[in-house]
Image (cartoon, rainbow, N blue to C red):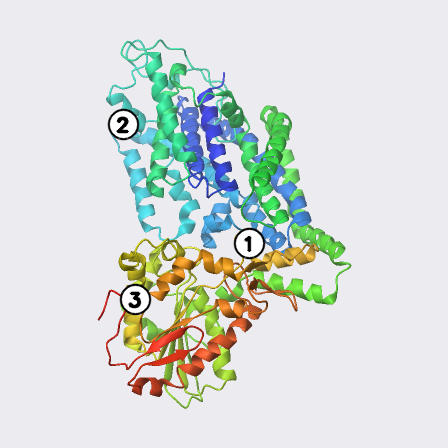
Amino acid sequence: MKRPDIQGIRGLSIAAVLTFHLDDKSFPAGFIGVDMFFVLSGYLMAVILFKEDHLNMTVFRHFYTRRFKRIVPLYAILLFSLAIIVPCFLLPRDVLKFCNDVVWAAAFSTNIQTVLEKRDYFTQLFDSNVLTHTWSLGVEIQYYLIVPLIVFSQRKLLKNCKYFPFTIILLTGKWNCFCREKVPWHFNYFPRQQYRSIPSLRGFGNFSLEDSLMKMDVFQLSENGKCLSLRCMKSTKYHQLDTDENANSDLDYHEKKQTKIFGAAFSNLFADVLSFVLFAFVFSPWIIFPISLLRIFSVILTSGLLVLGCEKHRQGVLLTNRPLVYLGDHSYVVYLAHWPIIVIWKNLADRSTFSANDILICLTNTFVISVLVNKTAEKYFIRTNDKTAAVFVGFLYGLLIMGLMFNVPLEMNKAMEARTFSKTSINITEAIAFNERAARNEYTQHMPFEECVDDPESRSMRPGFRDSRPNFECVWKRQNATGNVTILVTGNSIAQIATNILKWIIEKENFTQVAMMRLVSMPACYPLEVYYYTCTGFMNSLPQLVQAMKPDLTFVIFDELHINATRMNAPIVNVATDTATADFAAFLHPIVSASRFVVYDELYPRPSLMLTTGMGVAMQKRLSRNQSLDDLRAPLEEFKKYYAPYFARLDQLHFPNLIRHNTSAPLCAEEKGMCWWYNRRNLHSYFTDFSHLTVDGQELMRESYTKILNNSPRRKVEFHRARKINELHIIGSILVRERNSVIRIGIRRHVQ
């Protein structure tokens, strides 16, 4: 009979993944469902292999053929179905990406592709990639390939050395790998995930979770004092015990009498307590612990529940309730189907976050498909012979390969496009092509402009900093300059785009005084929030660079709307004691002290995050489908109201040489009080995604940047010699005092 607690753990795991993918803001910890899957898989594989008295080729062949029939046929159906569905519903760029990704997915190597291409897993959740979720199956299959070797090696080593520290060696290797990881794409890196299966394996060198529990005399389950655990499971009868998250685990377990120390009620209650804690971790609206600790706790709790569940009376009520068990029975098909459904619906509805109706539609489609496939294909392939399953998979893979060789998905998509565009004008066609190019975000793949070349000098100004990005650091030295004005542009990826605008203005307006412009930026970095290790070094090295360079004009350009605004836009309780204002002033202080003038770009309005993958894709999609564009705008007043605390904090900064660049004015100048996200004259998007400007968006900023350059580099001598207070109106007003006078910085209560 089935172990209902194992099916319950499956059900909880897939429920966690579903909630996270459907609404990651309400269920931010749902990703630990995959960790629970890995622990369960490791436990069941250990049971299968450790029950064998002798490990030989027959055992391994039987092990792998069972895994093949469970996983690969349904997986092949998924890939073949998507090869037909994706061209019908997604854009050409998404179809082209699918054709590349499906090759890796077919080889169960999506996680390897992610590592080689240095993709961030969590970023991919907001992309139109229908195969993102297949990374976990890649990890699983790769683990299947090595687990027999682990078990075989463990037996040989323990045979010669009873107390060989096998698990300690595995965990040490994992910890070494973890310590060397520095970037987020290692989340789906194979070595990083494998340690989660280790706690469920049978006593490697007397050092397993189960052995620890036994030594504490907590779970003495049988009448003669011996435990019912993996150690004694060899004597237990098993019937078709399956080993992965896609299987139904059928296990005949003995009904043991409860011990004299602990009654069945207490054992059941203890299992429910552990289950309740695991439920709380999964469905909490907050991430209760740091992510690394949360994963470790989920691994320990899942392992403990699996060990407890060896006896029926210790399985608890929460994990054995019928709805959860039923969900666990369909977990594999649910996992395969849910993500493509979510991606396709997001694409059709053109949104990145779901309403209640959207969630209901996705869940309904997922469960209907899952039940149908489970009752037909899944059960058929479990019972069929090995040759039938292999021929079926070979046939589908052959069709898939032939389709890719002859570009069938792309041709299908072109046919759909031709039918859609038949009544469109040349102008619409050109607009679609422009927005498609804009959506690629190719600016990250090269320098901002050809004349901006590698800059070893800037790296020498920052001793100890070794993490510069080639396409985000460069220097432009003008050949025909008549002056010696130097400009520094720093910030994140927004700064790189701004360099393009400044270069065009300097040449167009003939600012011959500018001798050099230097770009030093780091993508995804923010002044008050550091999420990547590279950002810490970059922020710490900035004062060194500015001090060594002493630029005449420094542009500080950070995209702070989504991350940094969590502090800068938090409600202000007391202006005099506001730490965010003081910290931001402290960040600016060394920059304004070493620069003649500093231009700080304020936040500007930008498209709603409700859009699927940004404005470029949204415009391409809507134009090709003849959908309305009326909602691609927002009132300026809403922006100002929402970010009132942010601007109030900026008002507390009183550096005499600080120029605040009001970037919202040019972006919202076409219609009074309204900010449009696209050019209504040619239907070109102003944004590539949610924040980076296209050529048309950059054009809007040129006038305001021109005013800044007109009023700072050309008049630097006048400003330097001024002895009285002068007021300069550029976009925002600034107060200019003599350079040697007292400089007030930070909030008003700080005076230097």
Look at 69% across and 52% down and name the residue there.
Answer: 413
Evaluate whether residue 449 shows in this view. no
Above or below residue 741? Residue 415 is above
Disc on the earlier residue, 2 or 3: 2
Above or below residue 478? Residue 72 is above
Cα–Cα span, label 2 and label 1: 50 Å
Which numbered disc, 2 or 1, marks the residue closer to the eye? Answer: 1
Q: Amino acid at mark 3?
A: Ser
User: In the rendered structure, are the residues bearing label 2 and label 3 in contact, judged by CB atoms less than 8 Å apart?
Assistant: no
Look at 58% across and 35% down and name the residue there.
Answer: 363
Number of numbered tags placed on the structure image: 3
Q: Amino acid at mark 1?
A: Thr
Q: Is residue 674 left or right of residue 741?
A: right
Residue 57 percent across, percent down from the top left: 47, 29
Evaluate whether residue 739 shows in this view. yes
Q: Viewer-proximal residue, 144 or 300?
A: 300
In the rendered image, which residue does mark 3 sit on?
Answer: 541
Look at 34% across and 10% down and name the residue there.
Answer: 258
Instruction: Quadrant for residue 613, please give it.
Output: bottom right
In the rendered image, which residue does mark 2 sit on?
Answer: 206
Q: Viewer-proximal residue, 438 or 672?
A: 672
Secondary element at image label 1: loop
- The C terminus lies in which quarter of the figure? bottom left
Which numbered disc, 1 or 3, marks the residue closer to the eye? Answer: 1
Q: Viewer-proximal residue, 160 or 630?
A: 630
Disc on the earlier residue, 1 or 3: 3
Disc on the earlier residue, 2 or 1: 2
In the rendered image, which residue does mark 1 sit on?
Answer: 613
Residue 540 percent across, percent down from the top left: 29, 64
